[in-house]
Amino acid sequence: MVDEEKQLIETVDENGNVINFELYDIVEVEGQEYALLIPAEKEDDAEEEEELVIMRLTQDGEDYIFESVDDDEEFNKVAEYVESMDVEEEE
């Protein structure tokens, strides 16, 4: 997990809505980095499990670009990796 202060990431969805996320962690799967993001605006329903958003990270000079993962195979590969991290932490 990223140990620094909360890092807030602002993205814009396909409808032009601004969505704020908190950077939870950055993982590398098969040489590609992915950001694990948690929505910054929490719902009032505290019993609901936190949603984790996976975005591909690419670097443009010194800046990072967050891209949605549209390929199901790529998404599933990263999701399985993240789930295996959770299992390791529980042991």
Image (cartoon, rainbow, N blue to C red):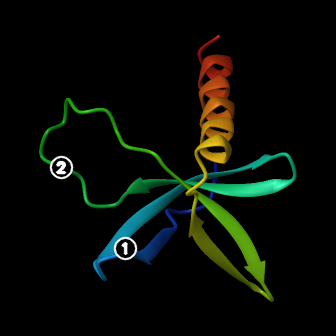
Residue reaching furthest right? Answer: 31
The kind of residue on which mark 1 rests is Asp
Q: Which residue is disc 2 drawn over?
A: 43
Q: Which residue is disc 1 drawn over?
A: 13
Q: Secondary structure at mark 1?
A: loop
Which percent across, then down, holds residue 40? 34, 60
Which percent across, then down, holds residue 50? 35, 39
Pick whichever of labels 2 and 1 is earlier in the sequence: 1
Quarter of the image containing the N terminus?
top right
Circle number at residue 25: none
Q: Residue at x 65, y 61 (%)?
A: 56
Q: Is residue 86 above or below residue 60?
A: above
Residue reaching furthest top? Answer: 91
Which percent across, then down, holds residue 51? 37, 43
Foreground: 14 or 44?
A: 14
Q: Would you identify the image quadrant in which residue 13 lies?
A: bottom left
Q: Is residue 35 above or below residue 88?
A: below
Q: Would you identify the image quadrant in which residue 86 lies?
A: top right
